[in-house]
Amino acid sequence: MSRRRLLLSAPLLLAAPLVPGLIRPALAQGAALSARDQADLRRVEAYFNAMTTLKARFLQVAWNGASAEGTAWIWRPGRMRFDYDPPEPLLLVASHGQFMQFDRELGQPTVVPTSATPLAFLLRADLRLSGDVTVTRVERSGGFLRVTLYSSRSPAEGTLTLVLAEQPMELRQWVVVDAQRHETRVTLSQIETGGRFDSSLFEFNDPQFLEKEQMRRR
């Protein structure tokens, strides 16, 4: 099996919905959160709600050790782009409530609602870690805060763990777990926030978008 197929056998950092069969009954009602936990969750909410743009390098590692790197752009609210370095042919883009996965080798895009992706809630204009998001665990270690959560509306769909540096608060990593309890871990580096992005990076409904993306690799 090729390096690429090994990587894609695990859930993508955005594209694969969290699948049924993961959540244990003990977690179905969420965790009993302390006052400190609640305060930290409010800090996490404030961090994301104050964020406009983030650009970073990413390293994605699948449960079987397969890895890939690339560049990530987050433009809140509503837009994301994850462009994998060669030889990986994948491009993932979220914009206007839609999410596109484009395989440059196959030359065909797949489009689903952004709401079908694990990180969709990070793109909300007003992010809240309550209501339709249930937090199961808040952990602190070595200056990092780990928040594990799932969709309150679909608790059987799986979990997402956000890892943030505490001082100053900054998103550093997330972990998606699938039905077989396999982890896909995405770690950010060279993080830049507050910059300006070219909107054409996200406009995959433009008839010339895919042609331009193919040209980027030539």
Image: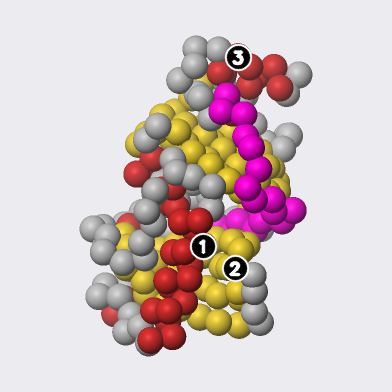
Mark 1 is surrounded, within 10 Å at the Cα level, by few (under 14), some (14 to 19) or many (20 or more) other residues, namely some
Q: Residue at x 60, y 74 (%)?
A: 166
Q: Mark 2–mark 3 contact, CB under 8 Å?
A: no
Q: In the rendered structure, does residue 32 fall within the stretch colored magenta?
A: no
Foreground residue, 5 or 102?
Answer: 102
| Residue 178 place in picture, x, y as percent | 43, 58
Mark 2 is surrounded, within 10 Å at the Cα level, by few (under 14), some (14 to 19) or many (20 or more) other residues, namely some
| Residue 129 place in picture, x, y as percent | 36, 65
Judging by the rendered image, the residue that carries numbered circle 3 is: 211
Quadrant showing the N terminus: top right
Give the CA separation, mark 2 to mark 3: 38 Å
Is residue 99 visible in the rendered structure shown here? yes
Q: Residue at x 49, y 50 (%)?
A: 11
Give the CA separation, mark 2 to mark 1: 7 Å
Q: In the rendered structure, does residue 186 fall within the stretch colored magenta?
A: yes
| Left or right for 3, reference 38 | right
Question: Which region of the structure is painted magenta?
Answer: 183-200
Q: Which disc is residue 129 wearing?
A: none
Foreground residue, 74 or 185?
Answer: 74
Q: Mark 2–mark 1 contact, CB under 8 Å?
A: yes
Eye-nearest disc, 3 or 1: 1
Judging by the rendered image, the residue that carries numbered circle 2 is: 169
Find numbered disc 1 in the image and state the secondary structure of the residue it sits on: helix
Q: Which disc is residue 47 wearing?
A: 1
Foreground residue, 8 or 12?
Answer: 12
Q: Residue at x 66, y 43 (%)?
A: 195
Eye-nearest disc, 2 or 3: 2
Give the mark nearer the N terminus: 2 vs 3: 2
Give the mark nearer the N terminus: 2 vs 1: 1
Find numbered disc 2 in the image and state the secondary structure of the residue it sits on: strand
Mark 3 is surrounded, within 10 Å at the Cα level, by few (under 14), some (14 to 19) or many (20 or more) other residues, namely few
Q: In the image, what residue type sits under mark 2?
A: Met
